[in-house]
Amino acid sequence: MKYLTFALTKGRLAEKTLSMLEKLGVTCDEMKDKHSRKLIFTNEELKLKFFLAKGPDVPTYVEYGAADIGVVGKDTIIEAGRKVHEVLDLRFGKCRMCVCGYEEAAELLEHRELIRVATKYPNIAKDYFYNKRHQTVEIIKMNGSIELAPIVGLSEVIVDIVETGSTLKENGLMVLDEVCPLSARMIVNPVSMRMENDRIRELISSLRDLIREEQICV
Ligand code: PRP
């Protein structure tokens, strides 16, 4: 039997994924050692391999088949635009992609003014402003702490993830529009989906049942 390789997004998404897999009897004790410098972990019995990666790299590993399966945020999947199959909404890591700024910026949006938009997600921002709003804007790619942009005058608005909304609130900013809802998704390499169809389908269906059960319990 061939190994099925998982690329998991480092941090909370990987932790939550591993705990879901554990409930299905899929364990990888090697990964629990926080001090380990190992990069790839194996479950010999089930012929599975796992590795952790930065979010934006997960769709890349999956598109090229270096991983058969990936778990990553919907934001990263849309932004990356890779050729992968999105097969399951894991229903955790829920948040929203939003256009945010000071209250006064609402008018600039309404009048479709030529404004600056700071974001870590230029493709998502471009699609939203050009294809959905038909508004010409200047998009500025940044790498983090995006909320700083309107505060220091770099841009009028930002396109960023809002989870609890506390970063916005603490900085006097607000949601001006919602771009799309987000959550963790499972993605699969198209060739692996064909070659390992039975194993992958069984995994998806077990995870789907688990998600359904957990939602009933909430
Ligand atoms: C994310 C996002 C917002 C914040 C939203 O940033 O970019 O800044 O979380 O969360 P909240 O609505 O619960 O306040 P992250 O902490 O991932 O770091 P980054 O700013 O470097 O992207």
Image: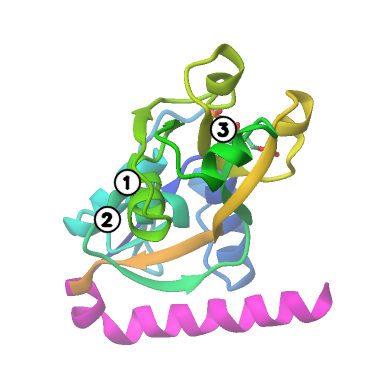
Which quarter of the figure has residue 122? top left
Q: Magenta residues: mostly which secondary structure?
A: helix
What residue lies at 49% left-to-right and 85% top-to-bottom? Answer: 205
User: Given the current orientation, which residue lies at the most extreme right position?
Assistant: 218
Identify the amino acid type marked 2. Answer: Gly
Which quarter of the picture shows residue 17?
bottom right
Q: What residue is shown with label 3?
A: 34
- Which residue is nearer to you in this view: 156 or 68? 156
Secondary structure, mark 3, is: loop
Residue under numbered circle 1: 123
Q: Nearer the viewer, residue 11 or 202?
A: 11
Q: CA distance from mark 2 to mark 3?
A: 32 Å
> What residue is rendered at 74% in x and 76% in y?
215
Q: Is residue 191 above or below residue 61?
A: below
Q: Which residues are magenta?
A: 191-218
Q: Amino acid at mark 3?
A: Lys
